[in-house]
Amino acid sequence: MPKYIVRYGIMRSIGVMASRNDIVYRRSMEVIVRTDRGIEVGQVLCEATEDALSHLDQPATGHVIREVSNDDVVSIDGIDGDRKKKLAICQKHIEALNLEMKLIDVEQLFGGERLVVFYLSEDRVDFRELVKLLASEFQTRIEMRQIGVRDEAKLLADYGDCGKPVCCNSHLIQMPPVSMKMAKLQKATLDPTKISGRCGRLKCCLRYEFDTYEAIQKQLPRVGAYIVTRDGKGKVLNQQIISEQLLVEMEDHRRVVIDASDVLTVVKKSSTVSEGKTKQETKKVPAGEGGDSGQKNKAERTEKNKNSKRNASGEGSEDSKSGKPPRGKRRQRKRGGRNKKPQGGGGAEEK
């Protein structure tokens, strides 16, 4: 049983459809398919080969019923003609019920099983009364589907700034997330009016080349790194990723643009900084002094700091009961008494 990849529905969904007969369907052929929603009109894209299926993430499944006939074309034209009329009726009921929602579009399935209503809303909407009115009006099942602004562009937008049909309405199956980082990496202008699509969000095409830019950037020296070239040493100031070139400031303060292939060696900035810190932390030891004496001096300074803090907090005051001076002062007096030398006829005799 041959299988084909078919695009169907107003949201241009992708599904793998099995054919119940041996008829060969060619690319771009209009067919009638049965999906989980009902009978719809689809377009054959290609055969469901292993390579084609590897690019799809959990596609829908269904069956190809037949090729679109002349009678089917008349029915499709009738459905498209009634689309604007049904859209106006839905808008009238929404305004009558004062619902906080924006009607985007409606989709009537080919088999008449249901009518899908697409709308925008920031808050949750109670549309139970609306569903009752629409079901009695159209005599079919009503499905309310809330979408976002990017899906709105997928339904209503026609052409982009490039002059071609918008990607979301032509070949994109899923709209990938796009961030400002992608625009900055590609050196695109940051003007929102120039990098935004018909939906008001960042353009999907910013995503297409991001992986290539990111892969090339990883191979280039980073901004701020010191490099060695054939003309000498320099510092990287900027990267031109797509052309694989670097803006370098040489040792004589000249700024030149070189190819990445001209870089002979890359000296990482972090290693240079660490070497500078190591040199600053290293101190010269005077001749005749060893490491033990340095440690001894450090211990003495620490002891003096402790004594000064003890005196400032009141711990070094004289004891009221004993009337003796603090221990630190007693040590100083004893040390002073031992080191004192009598002067000729001047000082008092020590007993």
Image (tube, grey):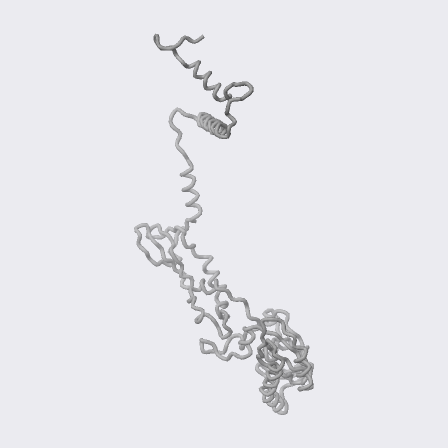
Q: Outermost residue toward the front?
A: 320
In the rendered view, would you say 100 is above or below 187?
below
**In the visual, does 247 lie left or right of 161?**
left
Residue at 36%, 55% (x, y): give it: 248
Q: Report if residue 234 is visible in the image.
A: yes
Quarter occupied by the C terminus: top left
Residue 42 coordinates in the image, percent (x, y):
61, 81
Number of numbered callouts drawn = 0
Of the pair 101 and 349, the residue shown nearer to us: 349
Residue at 61%, 86% (x, y): give it: 89
Residue 161 coordinates in the image, percent (x, y):
45, 76
In the rendered view, would you say 338 is above or below 268?
above
In the rendered view, would you say 154 is above or below 270?
below
Residue at 30%, 54% (x, y): give it: 254
Quarter occupied by the N terminus: bottom right
Of the pair 40 and 32, the residue shown nearer to us: 40
Q: Report if residue 22 is visible in the image.
A: no
Residue 180 coordinates in the image, percent (x, y):
48, 64
**In the visual, does 179 lie left or right of 10?**
left
Residue 298 coordinates in the image, percent (x, y):
46, 28
